Each structure stands twice: as C-alpha cells, then as structure tokens.
Image: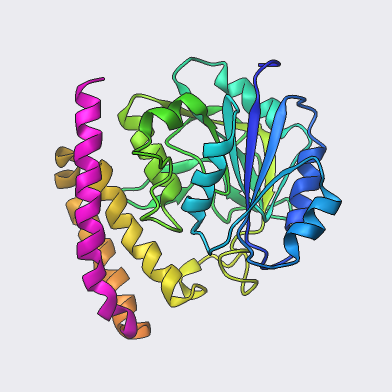
Amino acid sequence: MSNKIVSIIIVAAGTRDYLKFCLDSIRGQGYPDKEIIVIDNSLKPDFEQEFRQSYPEIKLYPSRENLSYCQALNKGIGVSKGDFILCLNDDVVLDKDFIDEALKCFTFSEDTGIVSGKILRFDKVTIDSAGLSLSIWRTAEERGYGDKDKGQFQGKCRVFGVNGAVAFYRRNLLEQIKLGEEYFDSDFGYFYEDLDVSWRAHRFGWKGYYTPTALAYHLRGGTARQGSNPNKRFARHCLNDDLLFDLMKNRYLAIIKNESFFNLIIHFPFILFYDVFAWGYLLFFRPRLIKRAWRLIKTAAAAFKKRKLMDKRLEGK
C-alpha cells in the first residue's frame, strides 16, 4: 500500500473551530502518499484567506452556496486522485496511525471496499461507532454506540458499513456504485448517506471490515447540532426541523433504493413498528413537520428511478 494515494476529503461547516484539530491530526499521520482536500461550506468571506495562510499545502475549494454534506463530498471526491478515499467530518481527530492501520484491512481481499476503525468520543472512553449495521428496523445502527470501551470490540471482523464521520472507501467501489456524477446521493443531504453507500456496495458484492487498531475521535453532533447538546444519545431531540425531516425521509429513500422484496416482506412488521413511534413523536412533539410529508412523494419517485438504474447495472455486472 506504500505507493497508493489516499485522498482525505473534509467538509468544513465552520460552525465551530474544530477544523484545526482535524487537520493537525492529519498532518501527524505517518502515511506519506496523501492529499488533503477541504470543501469550505462555511460561506464565511474571510475563511479562505485565513485558511490559505495557515495551511498553504492543503487544497481548498470554497463553496459559493450552501451545499449539503453529500454535495460537498461529491465535489471533493470528483477532484481527488487517490486510490482510497477517506471522508471526514470536521469534528473528527485521527490517531497518528489511523491511515496505516486502516489500509491494512484493504489488503484482506480485492473485494474489501469499506473499512471502519474504532471511533471514540473525545473522552476516549465512550464508543461512538465500531462499524455500521443494518438493523431489523432498517435503520443505521452503530455498533457499541454510547457504550464504555471495555475491549468488547478488540477483534477485527466483517461489518455492514462505516460511520459517515470517518468513512474509508476503495475508489473502485465508489466509481462502480455512483449514479451520474454522484457518489453520495444528493437527495439525502444529511443522514443515512453512509448506510446508502454501504448498502449499494453490498449489492455489488463489496465487503466491509472493522479494525480496532485504527482509532479516531468524534464529537457526535458537533456540526449537525450546531454546538447544542453534542454527544446526546437521542439525536432527534436535538435536531432542528430540517435535519429531523432529513433523518426520517432518508431512511425511506435508503430502503426504496436498496431493499430486496423478500427482505422487505420479512422486515415489514419491524419497519411498521418503528414508523408508528417515529410518526407518533412528530405528532406529539413536532406536529408542524407532518405538513412536509407530501415531499416524500417527490423524493420517493426519484429514489425508485435510481433503484431501477442500479438494478439494470447489476444485471449487466
């Protein structure tokens, strides 16, 4: 792997000063062949000048409009040249050996396309994610989420996917599953984009692995919750209306695009049970969001079209 380029894509929201700690941890990586790309989504007029003075060697791409997380990642991946792509939130700090340790998993087999490290909170004792699972409710479920790290995830193993805050992909995987120019589905915006990519990858036969020796630290909700209640377990209580609607909408889009008919029938009772509570929460605590339900029709129609295109590609594989 020593001659392979790793492209690191960071989306800078600019809501708080996390980016410096993130970039300093990347600078401290021992792996030599890497390029760092920052997508400036802060819309702050003085951000670019201050950034170039502090980090002249890092590629900065300012956004002239407020891009969603998926749109910003697509922009970064599109201009990158790496054999492997590491997508990072700006509220993440990497251990000094993260890249070296994560790359070892890609050598397991040619069909290893996703690698997850052990992601801890900033207290370094609480687990944020030990890999992504697809739950019976058809939600994105983080292994070990919120638990104290007692060594229960010290073994390497297969996982369904990777948390989007620290997502490591083989470039060939992203090129195979993209639709048009989109690696991440821009209809998602925020939330479930990591599950959607992992699910599409699995449909094409790619595998995901978890390694505990690749360590990273994440301030859960540091960006999405805009500095309010970071690390709180029940995220939906801390999200504004737009983000909460995305959280609910995108679960449906991921199911439409990726779930097989057989598995849909098996899991339908669990999906329905989850939905009763999710919509019940909206009814009692966020009734104004009920009015947005009609928007699901438009996005669902687009998801069905993308599903059809992906199915055709799989037939010709």
Q: In this view, does 29 lie above or below 93?
A: above
Q: In which quarter of the image is residue 250?
A: bottom left
Which residue is found at the position 43% from the left and 58% from the top? 189
Quadrant where the image shows the N terminus: top right
Residue 273: % across, % down: 24, 62
Residue extending farthest to the right is 53
Which residue is found at the position 53% from the left and 51% from the top? 72
Is residue 298 in the magenta section? yes
Res 143 seen here: no
Where are the magenta residues, as a range?
288-317
Quadrant where the image shows the C terminus: top left
Q: According to the image, what is the colour scheme of the structure?
A: rainbow
Which residue is found at the position 67% from the left and 64% from the top? 14
Is residue 164 in the magenta section? no
**Position of residue 243 in the picture relative to residue 214 (left or right):** left
Residue 37: % across, % down: 66, 42
Total tally of numbered discs in the picture: 0
**Chief secondary structure of the magenta portion:** helix
Residue 262: % across, % down: 15, 38
**Position of residue 299 in the picture relative to residue 237 (left or right):** left
Query: 157 or 62: nearer the eye?
Result: 62
Residue 227: % across, % down: 65, 71
Query: 176 or 251: nearer the eye?
Result: 176
Res 238 seen here: yes
Query: 207 or 301: nearer the eye?
Result: 301
Q: Is residue 98 above or below residue 135?
A: above
